[in-house]
Image (cartoon, rainbow, N blue to C red):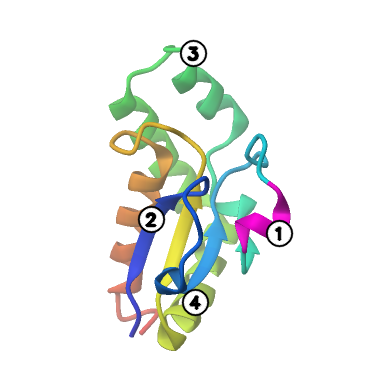
Amino acid sequence: MGILKTKRIYELAEDTDGKRILVDRLWPRGMKKERAELAAWAKEITPSADFRKLYHTGGIPFEGFAAAYLEELEASDEAKAFIPKLHDMLAEGDVTLVYATKNAEQNHVQVLVRWLKHHLSSTDVL
């Protein structure tokens, strides 16, 4: 079983990344598709535009954003359908979720990874 990793999309792709999946709703500014070296673009598991904008403009703190995003993920059939796909990719090797934001500590990817790992460890998927 591979390892689930995260990385800014602006960092160079490496062989150790395994399959790279973009987990941003918008295409990263200035990034050429060839340089991104993506296996997939998973828009369906990203935060809604409303919550994303509210957080980025300072309308809600990170904790409020994270809670709202978790609720969105739990309610999303598309997000739940992504879990077995990710499980299959991890069975083949490492997977790196790539994102554009500069803040590596407080971003949607950290929330997403916790949610995915929780669901990947459940007996429903394995």
Residue 64: image location, x then y, percent: 34, 26
How crowded pointer 3 is (Cα within 10 Å; few <14, some 14-19, many 20+) is rated as: few
According to the image, label 3 marks what residue?
57
Residue 117 appears at what percent x and percent y?
A: 31, 64
Question: Which numbered mark, 1 or 3, is in the foreground of this view?
Answer: 1
Sooner in the amino-acid sequence: mark 2 or mark 4: 2
The disc placed on residue 6 is 2
Q: Please, is residue 95 above or below residue 64 in the view?
A: below
* Amino acid type, residue under disc 4 in the picture: Pro
- Mark 4 surroundings within 10 Å by alpha-carbon count, few (fewer than 14), some (14 through 19), many (20 or more): some
Residue extent of the magenta highlight: 32-37
Measured as percent of width and height from the top left, residue 48 is found at 58, 36
Q: How far is the residue under mark 1 from the one under mark 4? A: 27 Å
Name the foreground residue: 89 vs 66. Answer: 89
Looking at the rendered structure, the secondary structure element under dot 2 is strand
Q: Earlier in the sequence, mark 1 or mark 4?
A: 1
- CA–CA distance between discs 1 and 3? 31 Å
Marks 3 and 4, how far apart in space? 34 Å
Q: Which mark is residue 84?
A: 4
